[in-house]
Amino acid sequence: MLKLIGSVMVFGSCAALGLSARQNLRRRVAAADAMLLALGLIRSEISGRRTPMPEIVGLLTENEQPIVRKVFRTLQRRLREQNGLSLGYLWRSTLRDCRAQVGLGTQECDILCDAANYLGRYDADEQLTGLSQVERRLAASREAAQEDLANRGNLYRTCGIALGLLVILVLI
């Protein structure tokens, strides 16, 4: 009976590791999607209404996407607390600090950090050009993450289950 309980626990933990790795890939795709939507909103606010960045950040804190809300609430709090620091610095530090919590990959985070070079620094047309470039790169990175999920997601799940079965067979 003790061997059976141990076998079930080993199998469950190995399967959970595989499923967790797959879930991380899924979160990466969802985070990239959410940030693409946020960049689209930023672009439309800059081009249409010429809204200043602090107001855009405030709008994004009310977004229905939890990933966008988390990132931009943190950015808004930092903008209020640390007045002497530039928007670009706060943008980069917020994205790097929130990266793991919202599921962004390192590559997507680096791409989004590049947006700090444009936001709030230049006139609207140059900001829009820079944002369009960041959006294209982020969309390409999102597609690569989607391919990883399609190719490696099932592999991780299957390897976790197979590892659990292998360990059970070795222990029995």
Image (cartoon, rainbow, N blue to C red):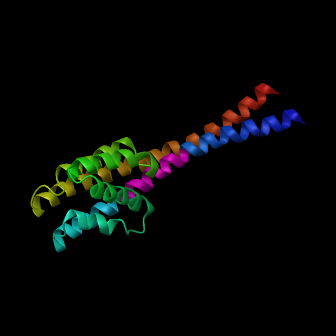
Q: Could you tell whether 97 is left or right of 168 in the image? A: left
Q: Could you tell whether 79 is left or right of 13 in the image? A: left
How many numbered badges does the structure rendering display? 0
Q: Which of the 4 image quadrants contains residue 67?
A: bottom left
Q: Could you tell whether 141 is left or right of 19 in the image? A: left
One can see residue 108 in this view: no
Residue sticking out furthest to the bottom? 49
Q: Quadrant of the C terminus?
A: top right
Percent x, y of residue 134: 24, 52
Magenta segment includes 82: no
Principal SS element in the magenta part?
A: helix
Q: In which quarter of the image is the N terminus?
A: top right
One can see residue 126 in this view: yes
Q: Which contiguous range is marked in magenta?
A: 22-35
Magenta segment includes 27: yes
Residue sticking out furthest to the right? 1
Look at 18% across and 73% down and name the residue there: 48
Percent x, y of residue 121: 13, 55
Percent x, y of residue 41: 28, 67
Look at 60% across and 45% down and name the residue there: 19
Foreground pick, 103 / 79 = 79
In this view, 85 is above or below 159? below
Look at 67% across and 36% down and name the residue there: 162
Percent x, y of residue 151: 49, 44
In this view, 132 is above or below 24? below
Q: Could you tell whether 16 is left or right of 44 in the image? A: right
Q: Which of the 4 image quadrants contains residue 120?
A: bottom left
Foreground pick, 94 / 7 = 94
